[in-house]
Amino acid sequence: MPEEKIDLFSGLSPGYDGVGEFYDLFTDDSDIPFYIQHAEKMGSPILDVAAGTGRVSLALAREGFEVVALDCSASMLADFSRKLQQVPLPVSGRITLIQANMEQFKLKQRFSLIIIPHSFSHAMTTEAQLACLHCVRQHMSENGLFILDLYNPEAQYAHARFEDLPVSIANGRTVERHGEISSDSDRRILRVDLQYIVRSADGSIVETVKDTSGAALISDVEADLLIRKSGFEVISEAGGFDNSPYDTDSSRRILFLRKKRRK
Ligand SMILES: C[S@@+](CC[C@H](N)C(=O)[O-])C[C@H]1O[C@@H](n2cnc3c(N)ncnc32)[C@H](O)[C@@H]1O
């Protein structure tokens, strides 16, 4: 009997279950000054969609902003909540955690700034992306700003393996992160397989934790259509958190959006 081919790309979940403490060891925080700069322009309240363990929300709350942090993962939010217990009350008191799906949330509040750092592509279908954008629009104040942080899809097609330098944690242990990115260009999705390897001081493996997540490859044309269809208009765009112009070599496409104005 012919062997059945396994479809590596079907049923990919949002992932991130039980990996929050490891996730935090390997983050790139170069976007934090960028978000603070825009928070200073727009003011509170801020909605951090797919906030994870609070990397950006916490930085904003430390600067005095009121933040509602939403994520679908109970596990990531539990790690976020643990971090909140370790920060001064005035900071933790500015953050509200909400477990919800970014594709279908309904809050009473309206926000002057909405952000989705590193996460919009986890909405893996056009329907999911439209649903997420619809929810975001519903929650924006009339003159609010929505910062849509997208990866540059041109930079993402290649199959890639990577290995990060080990990070030291307590008791002489280290954590390594190994990753593999596979893409299905027909279905325009990525699969990201991560392995966190914890080693004791003598180098022996204590624990290996795996995490798989999926992400959509969103072309510029698709993004432009999604935005228009969702009732937004582009104020400006950038190719990085240093506000450099967007071009085909940029690692990101960052769009500054507002509600489309009636002519
Ligand atoms: C790459 S992490 C980014 C976390 C955080 N924004 C940051 O920049 O550190 C992606 C996050 O998206 C969340 N996520 C994925 N799909 C989601 C969905 N449909 N609704 C809400 N959160 C989602 C995951 O649980 C995870 O916390």
Image: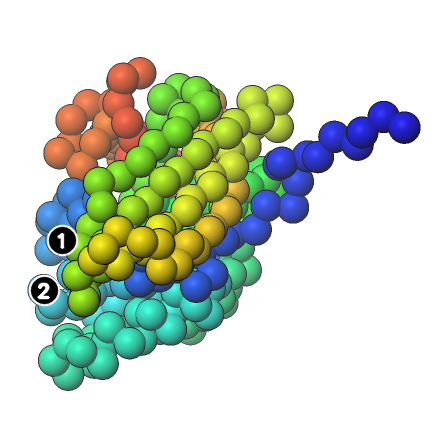
Q: Which mark is residue 63?
A: 2
Label 2 beta carbon less than 8 Å to ligand 1 = no
Please tell me whether mark 2 sits on a helix, a strand or a loop: loop
Q: Amino acid at mark 1?
A: Ile
> How far across and down, in percent of the image, does residue 200 sit?
26, 59
- Disc 1 packing (10 Å; few <14; some 14–19; many ≥20): many
What residue is drawn where x is 37% and y is 50%?
Answer: 196
> How far across and down, in percent of the image, does residue 35 sit?
18, 50
Relative to residue 166, is residue 53 drawn left or right? right
Mark 1 highlights which residue?
A: 36
Circle 1/circle 2 CB separation < 8 Å: yes
What residue is drawn where x is 29% and y is 30%?
Answer: 252
Q: Amino acid at mark 2?
A: Glu
| On screen, residue 250 above or below 136 | above
> How far across and down, in percent of the image, does residue 160 sit?
41, 26
Could one spot residue 116 in this view of the protein?
A: no
What residue is drawn where x is 19% and y is 23%?
Answer: 245
Quadrant position of the N terminus in the picture: top right
Residue, far right: 1
Q: CA distance from mark 1 to mark 2?
A: 8 Å
